[in-house]
Image: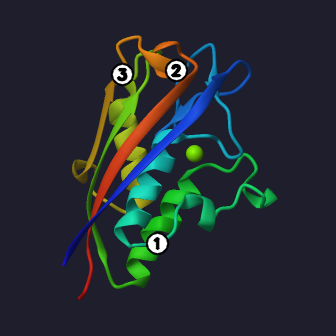
Amino acid sequence: MIHVGIGYDVHELVVGRKLILGGVEIPHTKGLDGHSDADALAHAITDAVLGALGEADIGHFFPNTDTRWNGAPSRVFLEEAARQVRLRGGRLVNVDASVIAEAPKIAPHLAAMKIHLAAALGLDPRKVGVKATTNERLGFVGREEGIAAMAVASIDLPE
Ligand code: MG
């Protein structure tokens, strides 16, 4: 039985943080702020996978009150979501995601992101879609105050 899930995440852009998206460090004047590495793309995909399982969100599995996740690479969240799928006897079919960022240019990093995300999820990189768009200078994304990401995941679960 095919199940789908959706995920969405936003983090604030601040001076003095690394910009990490899809596990890839992207040179920029600002980075995403948050408890972990604040990788909004990895978090959106994690929530999509957990959502497809009908599970609670990333904050339930990795509460930001737990100091173990201070500065944690978001790869551990992706790995845990994929592990939850396997625990149910399921199989991840594919994920697809979009990053919404006004700057910097994301496109040159998409191939590296796909490889990283696929490895964390135990998927073939061809089954990981990552795209990038701007917000046409509108709203908080357009003002470069933050970066958003949305994702869907499809999993095959036994009935
Ligand atoms: Mg997040």
Residue drawn at point x = 23 percent, y = 53 percent: 127
Q: Residue furthest bottom?
A: 159
| Crowd class of label 1 (few under 14; some 14 to 19; many from 20; radius 10 Å) | some
Q: Which mark is residue 140?
A: 2
Q: Position of residue 49 (x, y in %)?
A: 39, 62
Q: Secondary structure at mark 2?
A: helix
Residue 142 at least partly seen:
yes
Q: Position of residue 58 (x, y in %)?
A: 55, 59
Of residues 148 and 115, the one nearer the viewer is 148
Which dot, 2 or 1, sits closer to the camera? 2
Q: CA distance from mark 2 to mark 1?
A: 29 Å
Assign ligand 1 to one image quadrant: top right
Name the amino acid, label 1: Glu
Q: CA distance from mark 1 to mark 3?
A: 33 Å
Which dot, 2 or 3, sits closer to the camera? 2
The answer to whether mark 2 and mark 3 are in CB contact below 8 A is no
When asked about the image quadrant of residue 138, the answer is top left
Q: Which mark is residue 55?
A: 1
Q: Residue furthest right?
A: 67
Label 1 residue near ligand 1, CB within 8 Å? no
Quarter in which the N terminus is drawn: bottom left
Which dot, 1 or 3, sits closer to the camera? 1
